Amino acid sequence: MESATAIHVQVFTFLSVTTTNVLATNSPQAPGISDAERKQRLGVSETMLAYTLCVALMMGLCIVLCLEICGPWLLTFIGSQPEIVGPASQYLRIRATASPAVMLVMVAQGACFGQQDAWTPLKVAGAVAVLNLVGDYCLIICKGLGVVGAGITCPIAQYFGAVVFMVYLHRKGKCDKGIPLSWQGMPKLAAFRPYLGVASTLLARTLFTMCSYTCITAAATSLGTPQAAAHQVTLQLFWFLSFVPEPLSMSAQSLVARDSTDPARVRRLTRLLLKLGVVVGIILAAAIALIMTTLPWMFTSDKSVAADLKHLVVQAMCSTLLCSVVMMFDGISIGSGDFKHLPQTNLLGWIVTGAMLVIGRQLHGGLVSVWWSLPLFFATRLAWHLVHIYRHWTTSAFGRYHRASHQEVQVTA
């Protein structure tokens, strides 16, 4: 059930990232710009924010309609047993009503990051999580509503978050440094095309990454129950820790885009962010090694699973370190407007990962060889980033960074 309701969240995360990029690139607070350009950027940002919120709402409504019509089929497709399809469908349809709010929250988060505000998304996310916990306790335990209660809580919490974000953006827009929140009419394709260009690139990057994770998980689960359990524990730990460098990546996207008119400042910023990414990666690699070697009892009581976990420590450490560094490269590339190579990077990583899985299977390498494909995936992405930087040294944010003109999103009536 969670897979069916969460998949669109994974796919549509590009909404937040693209909004961050577009608003930060057209930031009216960028240094060294004239009053006329500042006014123009403010108008562009206002229009793009209004259009994006409108599109997000329509996408959310389409998701509700699709899950309402195709919910039972989707549950059967992902492997749900016939006896639980009925209750699961009920749960899914209730949860699906949160989709418009989820889409709006994604755009609102991107709008906050694009205006260099990271605290508000954190506070709203915390409030939504608390409301979810309280709602689950009241409806599931106190009222005995079971999965229906769990399904009801999610839309309530998400719509609460969406309303809080809209109120905040409206109030912030009235300030001198904020982007006004207003109705600009239905989105026009000609005006929205630059946004779609950024979004399609980032969506392709996300899909290739999901394909790589899916292939690795499929290979691990084919080895047997103990190996699948060890893989799941390690992967969940890795995913949990991989969220830590995400704020740094979002900061890179926002700050580099905002300061794109000042090449010297961009070069200093990129070097600082990259160093932070390496330091954070080392700390996280040490943390995952400590957890997997000393605390396996927290995740399993099966001795064979615990033994398999210890064989995956090095791979998990390498994956965590490389992931942190690659996320910084991704964020800086997106912020500097030099991100067309990202889908190619992730596609190449997926191909190399698949090749490693095939070779490991033929050599009977087991779970150890399967997990070496994950650091290889990130190493391939890092290597392609370096190749791209070398080829485009004069325009890369890591090199001389000479941008012929500021890449603003032009809005036409």
Image: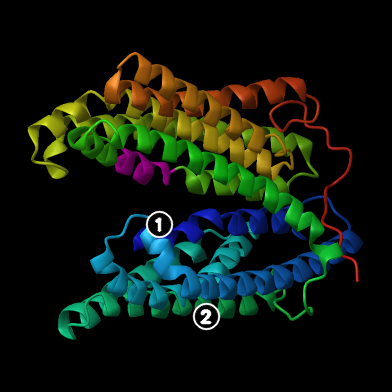
User: Are the residues flagged by discs 1 and 2 in contact, CB closer than 8 Å?
Assistant: no
Q: Quadrant of the C terminus?
A: bottom right
Question: In the rendered image, which quarter is residue 397 located in?
Answer: top right
Which residue: 66% across, 33% down? 344
Percent x, y of residue 95: 40, 73
The answer to if 28 sits in the magenta stretch is no
Q: Amino acid at mark 2?
A: Val
Percent x, y of residue 177: 71, 68
Q: Is residue 242 left or right of residue 27?
A: left
Disc assigned to residue 163:
2
For the residues labelled 1 and 2, the Cα–Cα distance comes to 34 Å
Give the residue furthest to the front: 82
Which residue: 34% across, 63% down? 1
Q: Amino acid at mark 1?
A: Phe
Percent x, y of residue 266: 71, 38
299 or 320: nearer the viewer:
299
Q: Main secondary structure of the magenta part?
A: helix
Looking at the rendered structure, the secondary structure element under dot 1 is helix
Q: Which residue is mark 1?
A: 77
Which circle, 1 or 2, is nearer the viewer? 1
Which residue: 74% across, 58% down? 29
Precedes in sequence: disc 1 or disc 2 = 1
Instruction: Give the magenta-colored segment's residue range.
Output: 235-244
Label 1 CA crowd tier, 10 Å (few <14, some 14–19, many 20+): few
